[in-house]
Structure formats: structure tokens, C-alpha cells
Image (spheres, rainbow, N blue to C red):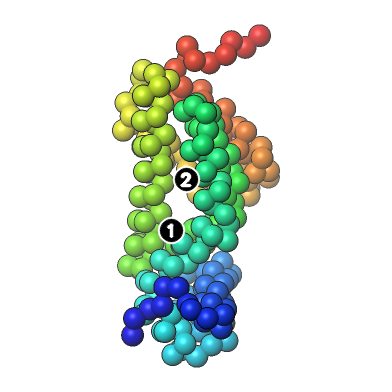
Amino acid sequence: MAAIDEPQNARSRRTREALLNAARKLIEEEGFEATTMAAVAISAGVSPRALYLHFTSRGELLTKLYAHLGVTEDIGSSLDRVWNSPDAVSALEEWAHHIARVHPRIMAVSQAVERAARTDPDAAAMRQTTMRNWHHGCSRLMTWLADEGSLAPRWSVPAAADMLWGLMSWDLLERLVTDKGWSPQEYGARLADLLRSTFVDSLDKPLTE
């Protein structure tokens, strides 16, 4: 059966929302391996047939969950603040604040996917999509910096993009926010300082008294 991308009635929309919420809760609370199609249907209180009307496979369910997180966590609006910045240096700093705003809220799902990606093809596909999107944003930022003449000369655009992508590690976020108790605001501010001092040409930095 073909999956329904956009349910046409309120009941179908509620069912789809319940399934996505159930999948997220299962991943966060019980781990990726426990998030089977049967478990999602039971958790959402729907029949297996109703589940398969909306999602034909666990891989499709996970793909839609990834998109759903973008909506429920308003990731698009957060990213708009990056790309609507007046210049590349401001955008780079806003990127740090975007990570601090959004990533703590989706960390549990993302870490569960990371752990499962080595052995589960559905998790691997979901992770690959996430990493590809991250790296695309990093490349766009570094290209913008280079075009404005603000990228530090020791960096090429590809190397800078790779490093920025690496600094988006879930492990770094967990160690500082979860283990060391930094607030998201503190994390964002300090990450912004780090990114500016690392990637921006020193001639563009204001002198410190």
C-alpha cells in the first residue's frame, strides 16, 4: 500500500501524529532497537493496518520522524536566523546559537540513531541524511565566509567545513551540557566565540582592550 504523505482528514492526521510521537518516545525511552513497527503501533494505540497505511516500512517511518522533528522543534525558524544574518561572520555565530537552541531537544533521538547506525540499515540511512544536511550547511557557511574575505587564510573552504561539521558532535554537546551542566545559552555563547576565533580572519576581529 502506498503511504499517505499528507492525510486528508482530521482523523488520519491525528493517527499520523500519534504514530510519530510514539516512535520518538520509544527511541528516547527504550532505544532504537525497541522501536519496531509493532511496538510503535501498540504505543500509539492503533492497529498494524493503520500504521502501514501511513508508513510502509520502519525506514520510511524514521525518515518522516526526522522531518517531523524539524516541524515540532521549529528547526526551520532557527535556521532562518542563520541564513538571514547580515554577514557571514554573524551567520557563523548564529550557527552556534542554532545548535544550542535545537540540538539539546533532539539529542536523545539522534544519539539513539547514532548507536544503532552501525548495525541497522534504517538507522544508518537516517544518520546519513542528518550528516549530509549538517555538512551542506557547514559548506554553505564557509563558502560565504570565503566570498566575503573573512575566512582565516589557514583554512580552505572544504577543510573548514569539515572541522565545523566535526564540532557539531553529539559527544561534545553531551559532555558540556549534560555532564558539565552548561546551559544551552552558555554553550551557544562559548561555541560562537570558539567558531569566530577559529575560522574568522584575525583582521576582521575587533581589538580587545
User: Helix or strand or loop: what does disc 1 sit on?
Assistant: helix
The N terminus, quarter of image: bottom left
Q: Nearer the viewer, residue 102 or 181?
A: 102
Answer above or below: position of 112 versus 77.
Answer: below
Q: Which quarter of the picture shows residue 36? A: bottom left
Q: Nearer the viewer, residue 160 or 172?
A: 160
Q: Amino acid at mark 2?
A: Ser
Answer above or below: position of 164 versus 47.
Answer: above
Residue 99 appears anywhere in the view: no
Question: Relative to 8, is 123 on the left or the right?
Answer: left
Q: Position of residue 38 (x, y in %)?
A: 46, 85
- The label shown at residue 169 is 2
Q: Position of residue 126 (x, y in %)?
A: 39, 61
> To which residue does mark 1 refer?
114
Q: Residue at x 46, y 62 (%)?
A: 66
Q: Residue at x 52, y 51 (%)?
A: 76
The C terminus, quarter of image: top right
User: Helix or strand or loop: what does disc 2 sit on?
Assistant: loop
Q: Nearer the viewer, residue 50 or 99?
A: 50
Q: Residue at x 38, y 78 (%)?
A: 3
Answer above or below: position of 135 versus 30.
Answer: above
Question: Relative to 146, is 103 on the left or the right?
Answer: right
Q: Count how many numbered circles sit on residues in the image.
A: 2
